[in-house]
Image (tube, rainbow, N blue to C red):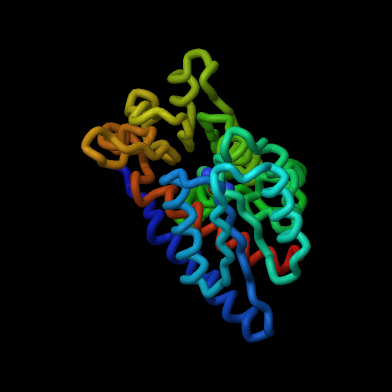
Amino acid sequence: MAELIDGKRISTMIKDECKQKVEEYKAQGIEICLAVIQVGNDPASSVYVNNKKKACAYVGMNSLSYELPEETTQEELLSLIQELNERKDVNGILVQLPVPAHIDEKTIINAIDPKKDVDGFHPQSVGSLCIGQPGFVSCTPAGIIQLLKRSDIDITGKHCVVIGRSNIVGKPMALLMLRENATVTIAHSKTKDLKAITRQADILIVAIGKPKFIDASYIKDGAVVIDVGIHRNADNKLCGDVDFDSAKEVASYITPVPGGVGPMTIAMLMKNCVDSISLQ
Ligand code: GUN
């Protein structure tokens, strides 16, 4: 029976460490401010954005909120980003994704000053991660590293299989595990015989986007299982990409959904905002 990795507890620990650092900066006369931009009113995005603003308040940072109408043009959004890039009192800029279809996501990500790219999505941030230079790291994968380290799970030399190759999770996750000296395999929707590969994993990180897809038959005895997925089923209950009830019987450690990876994303966003001061 697997031990639970408690993301709620670890994320609170990280937010409390941020709170402490924010107080220390305040004592030196330095305030930290995150600007959050949402275009349109996608309900899921509104929940995320609200949670980000609440987290800022919890750690004692300022936040600026821009709720722009759906029909905002790309030029208008770019001009707001430019203004925020130039503002000395703004340390982090976050454009909540997805943006409406008439706005090009890449152009928006590229417009954010890499020194304020607290999401870690800018090509310069991703490139820095790739070659081991200082820069912001995407919050969800950075949070997973914290979950492993703070649960005393050794990464060095382990075979880590990441299922998923998105720019936000899969790719940075693989790079981070490599930085931690794991042997890394990336699997994805075109991978042949997925089960043969996942069964080799000492650490299995699942960002596949399909509810309860990974059951015990995909997992080696004693493996660590990290579930990045989040879905709502017919009775409005949350579940992940992993079939938790089956997986917990073979895994040594497992993250639950909710309360595993989810809360780490915002905690690491707060950490990136705090770290922005030293990068700037
Ligand atoms: N949409 C879903 N996740 C994220 C995230 O981590 N950052 C931003 N900006 N948008 C998102």
Q: Nearer the viewer, residue 61 or 188?
A: 61
| Residue 79 higher or lower than 126, as above or below | below
Q: Nearer the viewer, residue 77 or 19?
A: 77
Percent coordinates x, y for residue 273 in the rendering: 62, 63
Decide if residue 225 is in sight here.
no
Decide if residue 88 is in sight here.
yes
Residue placed at 68% from the left, 42% from the top?
A: 74
- In this view, the residue farthest toward the top is 192
How many numbered markers are drawn?
Answer: 0
Q: Is residue 258 left or right of residue 19?
A: left
| Residue 210 higher or lower than 68, as above or below | above
Percent coordinates x, y for residue 266 in the rendering: 50, 56
Q: Nearer the viewer, residue 211 or 13?
A: 211
Quadrant for residue 23, please give it.
bottom right
Percent coordinates x, y for residue 186 in the rendering: 58, 28
- In this view, the residue farthest toward the front is 71
- In this view, the residue farthest toward the left is 235
Residue placed at 73% from the left, 67% from the top?
A: 278
